[in-house]
Amino acid sequence: MAYRFKLNETFEEGSRRIAREQLERARRQLKKSADQAVAVHETRKALKRVRALVRLVRPAIGETVYEAENADLRDIAWILSTVRDRHVLAETLTKLRSVSSIGSSSASELLHGIFNDANGAEIATIEPAAKKEALERLAVAKHRFADFKVDGDGFDAIGPGLETSYRKGRRAFKQAYATWTDDAFHEWRKGVQHHWRHMLLLSSAWPQFCAAQASEARELSKILGDDHDLAMLAAFVRSEPAERINAKQAALVEKLVRRRQQELRTRAYPAGMRLFALGAKELRGMMALYWEAARGPKLPERSKGELQSDGKVQLREKSQTPKSLPKPSRSTRNGNGEQRSRRVVRS
């Protein structure tokens, strides 16, 4: 169940296989995991993998199909989002308490109590109706992807999607540091996650290169994920469910959140420079060559030759016979007994 295309399958075959594997994985996690917070987290991760796959083949499936599939997968994840969001807020507060002075503050204690009240318990739970709907829709999606159509031959089926997605990620990187807004950094995070998963999907092309790219993107995604969670916490302290927190306490939380975000964004910048150093067309061209090389391309005709005893290859050159040969002659003797040559004229 590796999340990657195989070299011996078409991208259409690979897309069907990978999507169905991930959707089945999501169903199993949601049905069997004892820890419901973990179940929701793993299910949503599997859905993100399928959405990244659909984005990669977007130009080859058309906008209508892309929009429909992406919306359906997003909606399934949204059904489970309430449980995930509550768990993340509590987890983010715990992290913030460990790296700042908020740990012993009254605001921290109030927030902790509010999260517990909202969750109803320390462990977040999934509503039975929501779980049932999510499982049914996952089953329908898995069945639908059995006939998933991807147009295009060879790498051309995914090359345009790879280029477009990477270009958006590069632009989002620049926009994030130009505006410094939570929304801009969240958009960049999505671009980073797309590139991370695209490198995993194409890792058969050159495992070492793709692994380095995927690893860098994954670590960067974690940093930006923490940044986004902090933005959610800052928004929460100003929301109605947190009305027990007074203005002074909310301001303290926001101040510590912004300070921590500054640290995270400073760490993220050099990683972004490395990850998005290539141009979008350049990345597409490189990956196309890597994919072709991994599949074992035919050698150019003139590169074929015979291995000599010294280990060198002697190229088999074309015939060295000149286009026009000297015409053969035959000897005759003249009247004085001397030998002379007479050209033979060929008809």
Image (cartoon, rainbow, N blue to C red):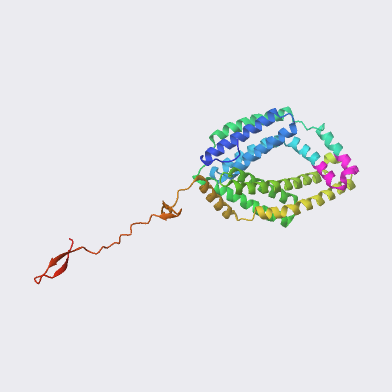
The one of 327 and 295 positioned closer to us in this rendering: 327
Location of residue 321 with respect to 139 vertically, above or below: below
Residue 154 relative to residue 243: left or right: left
Residue found farthest to the bottom = 336
Residue 234: x and y in percent read 81, 46
Q: In the rendered image of this protein, does residue 126 appear above or below residue 162? A: above
Percent from the top left, x then y, of residue 187?
69, 49
Image mark count: 0
Q: Is residue 194 above or below residue 331?
A: above
Res 84 → quadrant: top right
Q: Quadrant of the C terminus?
A: bottom left
Q: Is residue 149 visible?
A: no
**Percent coordinates x, y for residue 122 in the rendering:** 82, 33
Residue 96 covered by magenta stretch: yes
The reply, left or right, for residue 23 in relation to residue 239 is left
Q: Quadrant of the N terminus?
A: top right
The residue depicted at 80 percent of the width and 45 percent of the height is 235
User: Where in the figure is residue 134, as x and y percent of width and height?
Assistant: 67, 31
Q: Is residue 1 inside the magenta stretch?
A: no
Read off the magenta span: 92-111
Whether residue 143 is visible to the viewer of this picture, yes or no, is: yes
Magenta-colored segment: predominant secondary structure: helix
Task: Please name the residue shown 73% across and 27% down the image.
Answer: 128
Query: Observer-nearest residue: 196 or 318?
Result: 318
